[in-house]
Image (spheres, helix red, strand yellow):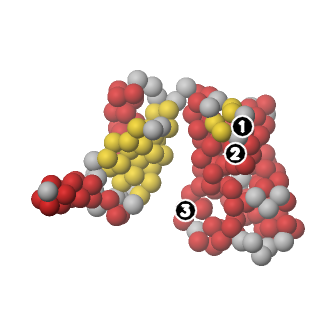
Amino acid sequence: METNGGIQASLSGRYAVALFDLARDANALDTVAQSLSGLKAAIAQSPDFKGLINSPVLSRDASGKTIAAVASAMGIDPLTTKFLGVLAQNRRLGQLPAVIRTYETLLSNHKGEVRAEVTSAHPLDAQQIASLAQNLRARVGRTVAVDAKTDPAILGGLVVKIGSQMIDSSIRTRLNSLAMAMKG
């Protein structure tokens, strides 16, 4: 299978690479990234939007018209809007979350950054994310783009994934380790 910058050319990967190439050629990498970030937030926060992109019952036409209306309401840039239309026509809107992740990775690689997926029990504010990015940069020696997620199940602390490396300082993991030590 072909790769682009080390990214497997899976179905979502091929779509992300195509979008990335179009955005680079149009000098709109950051504009598209902003639009995709808005879509990513909408998927995470809106069960209706998540249902729309995963709906098997909407026709191609209805899906295309609906996603175009959503894109317009969200202020999505024209290139990303057209891309969403292609996904809808090909019945691939369900691939959108994976396309967004892959696009973010491609953009980070292009900028010489490394991506870190950070999970916390409570949402991190901008200052905490900036501080974390600075600390991670000191650790890995490259600029770090932080992708923050929230998971109350970790109870506290952080879980940081950078590539294949994982730093787990969550309270849940510490409690599990303590429980295992007490059993042993």
Pointer 3: what residue? 44
Q: Earlier in the sequence, mark 3 or mark 1?
A: 1
Residue sitting farthest toward the front? 184
First in sequence: mark 2 or mark 3? 2
Residue at the spot 50% in from the left edge and 32% down from the top edge: 114
Crowd class of label 2 (few under 14; some 14 to 19; many from 20; radius 10 Å): some
Identity, as a three-letter code, of the amino acid under mark 1: Met
Residue 11 in the figure: left or right of residue 162: right
**Helix, strand or loop status at disc 2:** loop
Q: Quadrant of residue 48?
A: bottom right
Foreground mark, 3 or 1, reads 1
Q: Which mark is residue 35?
A: none
Residue 161 visible, this angle: yes
Note whether 9 is above or below 142 in the view shown. Answer: below
Between the residue at mark 1 and the residue at mark 2, the CA separation in whole angstroms equals 8 Å
Q: Which residue matches tag 1?
A: 1
Q: Position of residue 16 (x, y in %)?
A: 70, 43
The residue mark sitting in front, 1 or 2, is 1
The answer to which of 49 and 3 lies nearer the viewer is: 3
> Which x, y percent locates residue 175?
21, 58
Q: Amino acid at mark 2?
A: Ser
Q: Mark 2 = which residue?
A: 10
Q: Residues within 10 Å of mark 3 (few under 14, many from 20)?
A: few
On-image quarter of the C terminus: bottom left
Looking at the rendered structure, the kind of residue marked 3 is: Ala
Other-residue count near label 1 (Cα within 10 Å), few / some / many at <14 / 14–19 / ≥20 = few
How far is disc 2 from disc 3 in space, using C-alphas? Answer: 23 Å
